[in-house]
Image (spheres, rainbow, N blue to C red):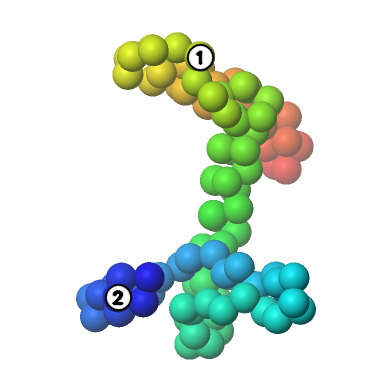
């Protein structure tokens, strides 16, 4: 992980990965490769909000739409089922989006 992180930093790209900062069974905080320089920028917080929104969509698709395990075979069929699930998720989101405006 640290080799990948150093390559990304060499290219002057700031990695916006999630931090697993919860406690272990022994009560210690989990270690992370992200330092304080990355965390202090406002762009990191914005990136994490966008990341959460994307993860919510995939979580909904896996649980509610039933795509945790795909029940069809073939790339074309899987793509069709996935697109249908994304469309359904967007239809579910429409009332909340309209309410916000």
* Residue occupied by mark 1: 71
Q: Is residue 85 above or below residue 30?
A: above
* Above or below 3: residue 40: below
Identify which residue, 90 or 4, lies in the foreground.
4
Tell me which corner region of the image, top left, top right, bottom left or bottom right, holds residue 60: top right
On the rendered structure, is 15 left or right of 60? left
Q: Residue at x 74, y 77 (%)?
A: 26
Secondary structure beneath disc 1? Answer: loop
- In the rendered structure, are the residues bearing label 2 and label 1 in contact, judged by CB atoms less than 8 Å apart? no
What's the residue at 63%, 43% (across, down)? 56
Residue 96 horizontal/vertical position (percent): 73, 36
- Distance CA(mark 2)–CA(mark 1): 38 Å
Q: Is residue 18 above or below residue 67?
A: below
Instruction: Residue lying at the far front in this picture: please name it.
Output: 26
Residue depicted at x 56% and y 79%? 31
Label 1 neighbour load within 10 Å: few <14, some 14-19, many 20+: few
Q: Nearer the viewer, residue 22 or 95?
A: 22
- Is residue 80 visible in the rendered structure shown here? no
Could you tell me residue 4's position as x and y percent? Answer: 31, 70
> For residue 59, what is the image quadrant?
top right
**61 vs 2, nearest the viewer:** 2
Q: Residues within 10 Å of mark 2 (few under 14, many from 20)?
A: few
Question: Could you say which disc has been placed on residue 3 in the image?
Answer: 2
Q: Secondary structure at mark 2?
A: helix
Mark yes or no: residue 100 visible: yes
Q: Tag 1 or tag 2, which sits nearer the N-term?
A: 2
Give x and y (percent) for residue 47.
51, 63
Residue at 46% x, 68% y is 16
Quarter that holds the C terminus: top right
């Amino acid at each position: 992980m640290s080799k990948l992180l150093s390559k990304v930093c060499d290219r002057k790209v700031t990695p916006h990965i999630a931090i697993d900062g919860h406690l272990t069974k022994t009560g210690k905080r989990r270690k992370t490769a992200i330092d304080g320089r990355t965390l202090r920028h406002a762009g990191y917080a914005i990136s994490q909000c966008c990341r959460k929104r994307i993860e919510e969509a995939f979580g909904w698709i896996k649980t509610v739409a039933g795509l945790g395990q795909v029940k069809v075979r073939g790339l074309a069929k899987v793509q069709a089922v996935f697109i249908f699930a994304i469309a359904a998720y967007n239809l579910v989101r429409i009332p909340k989006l309209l309410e916000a405006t």
